[in-house]
């Protein structure tokens, strides 16, 4: 039997399932869920995308590469995301499409890079920051968003999912003009720690709680224990102890699979990563990190639709009110998934997606399943996971 939920309740679950299939269904009032209308700053039927790219306005940009620093062969460091903050916090993000959609005084700098949904305001945040995820969560009570973030991090602490980052060829200094970065999803710590588990070691079964001390062996399908990988990488650099990956113009590595925010990884296209590097026990910590990029609206729908309610039952995609969620994310589309299609008049197909994060030293257990072994493919219809 399909469980019925009020639209407001299902909208609440949309966020909770999106962030690690949250374990609690929070009661958010109808007034807390609002699909943007065509009010002030709206596009009155869809902003027509210009054929010319704009220039970045006052949005924060990734730090520029250092000049004249020696790179060369260096160390290899493996870290696991320890905390994730939905939306990245106020003003987090970057100008991903290099235009300040309807936020700049100069019309030449306010062009939209794609055609927005008719009922969407389609505006960037201050300075041209692209962060549709923050725009969506701003319609929810702060306490609810905080609870969602708590649920994300509880799942990370339980060793169920994370994202592994491998930093190679880093010289260990404050500046390095060329480093290599790999990213791969992990679906958990599936083997006990050396020396056994603590008193709460069984609370997270079938996974084991993360200790965040470098001894956690996260399962990986594509990373060896020594950090050796064969899949495509991102080029980056370090400036003043800040790791920077500016993937806006790096088409070859493909998207980063961001796990932990639903039943299937979210593919972050052309990502931008900025994080402070700090030494720790021979390894590295990443602090004050921001990961921004472009995520297909259909990926968000799929990740949520495949999720199961906290108390079990049918997949969310089978619920009669799933169209509420479909509308929520489809109307929030504000960017193209492929920047090569910016400013050609195409309909927006993606969300500007931003999360804040920290990461700590980690170990790898190679040979893990490439997908979450606890999530089976649900009987979702193609129509329910697509934007109309």
Image (cartoon, rainbow, N blue to C red):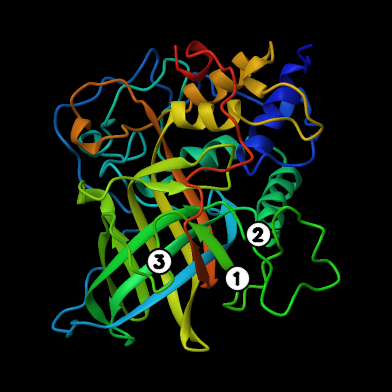
The C terminus: image quadrant: top left
The N terminus: image quadrant: top right
Q: Which residue is mark 3?
A: 224
In the foreground, 22 or 28? 22
Q: Judging from the image, what secondary structure is the residue with disc 2 in?
A: loop
Disc 2 and disc 1 in contact, CB within 8 angstroms: yes
Q: Earlier in the sequence, mark 2 or mark 1?
A: 2
Q: Which residue is mark 1?
A: 216
Disc 2 and disc 3 in contact, CB within 8 angstroms: no
Q: Earlier in the sequence, mark 2 or mark 3?
A: 2
Q: Which residue is at a point 46% across and 31% down the rendered structure image?
A: 299
Q: Position of residue 125 (x, y in %)?
A: 44, 43
Q: Which residue is at a point 36% across and 26% down the rendered structure image?
A: 349
Q: Judging from the image, what secondary structure is the residue with disc 1 in?
A: loop
Q: Which residue is mark 2?
A: 159
Q: In the picture, residue 23 is in which quadrant?
A: top right
Q: Position of residue 370 (x, y in %)?
A: 47, 46
Q: Residue furthest right?
A: 199
Q: Residue furthest front?
A: 367
């Amino acid at each position: 039997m399909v469980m019925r939920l009020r639209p407001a309740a299902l909208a609440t679950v949309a966020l909770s399932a999106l962030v690690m299939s949250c374990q609690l269904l929070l009661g958010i009032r109808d007034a807390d869920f609002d699909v943007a209308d065509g009010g002030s700053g709206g596009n009155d039927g869809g902003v027509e995308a210009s054929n010319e790219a704009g220039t970045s306005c006052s949005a924060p940009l990734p730090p520029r590469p250092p000049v004249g620093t020696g790179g060369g062969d260096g160390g290899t460091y493996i870290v696991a995301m320890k905390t994730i903050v939905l939306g990245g916090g106020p003003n987090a993000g970057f100008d991903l499409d290099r235009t300040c959609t309807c936020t700049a005084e100069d019309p030449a700098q306010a062009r939209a890079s794609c055609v927005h949904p008719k009922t969407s305001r389609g505006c960037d945040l201050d300075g041209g920051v692209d962060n549709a995820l923050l725009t969506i969560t701003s319609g929810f009570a702060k306490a609810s968003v905080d609870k969602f973030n708590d649920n994300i991090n509880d799942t990370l602490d339980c060793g169920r999912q994370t994202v592994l980052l491998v930093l190679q060829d880093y010289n260990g200094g404050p500046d390095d003009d060329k480093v290599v970065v790999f990213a791969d999803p992990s679906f958990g710590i599936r083997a006990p720690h050396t020396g056994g588990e603590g008193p709460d070691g069984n609370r997270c079964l079938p996974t084991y709680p993360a200790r965040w001390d470098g001894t956690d062996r996260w399962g990986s399908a594509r990373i060896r224990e020594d950090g050796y990988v064969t899949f495509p990488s991102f080029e980056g650099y370090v400036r003043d102890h800040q790791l920077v990956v500016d993937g806006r113009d790096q088409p070859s590595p493909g998207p980063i699979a961001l796990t932990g925010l639903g039943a299937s990884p979210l593919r972050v296209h052309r990502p931008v990563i900025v994080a402070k590097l700090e030494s720790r026990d021979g390894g590295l910590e990443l602090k004050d990190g921001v990961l921004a990029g472009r995520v297909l609206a259909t990926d968000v729908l799929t990740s949520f639709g495949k999720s199961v309610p906290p108390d079990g039952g049918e997949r969310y995609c089978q619920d009669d009110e799933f169209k509420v969620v479909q509308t929520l994310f489809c109307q929030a589309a504000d960017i193209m998934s492929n920047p090569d299609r910016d400013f050609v008049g195409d309909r927006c197909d993606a969300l500007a997606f931003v999360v804040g994060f920290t990461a700590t030293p980690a170990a790898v257990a190679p040979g893990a399943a490439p997908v979450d072994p606890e999530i089976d493919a649900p009987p979702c219809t193609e129509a329910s996971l697509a934007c109309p």
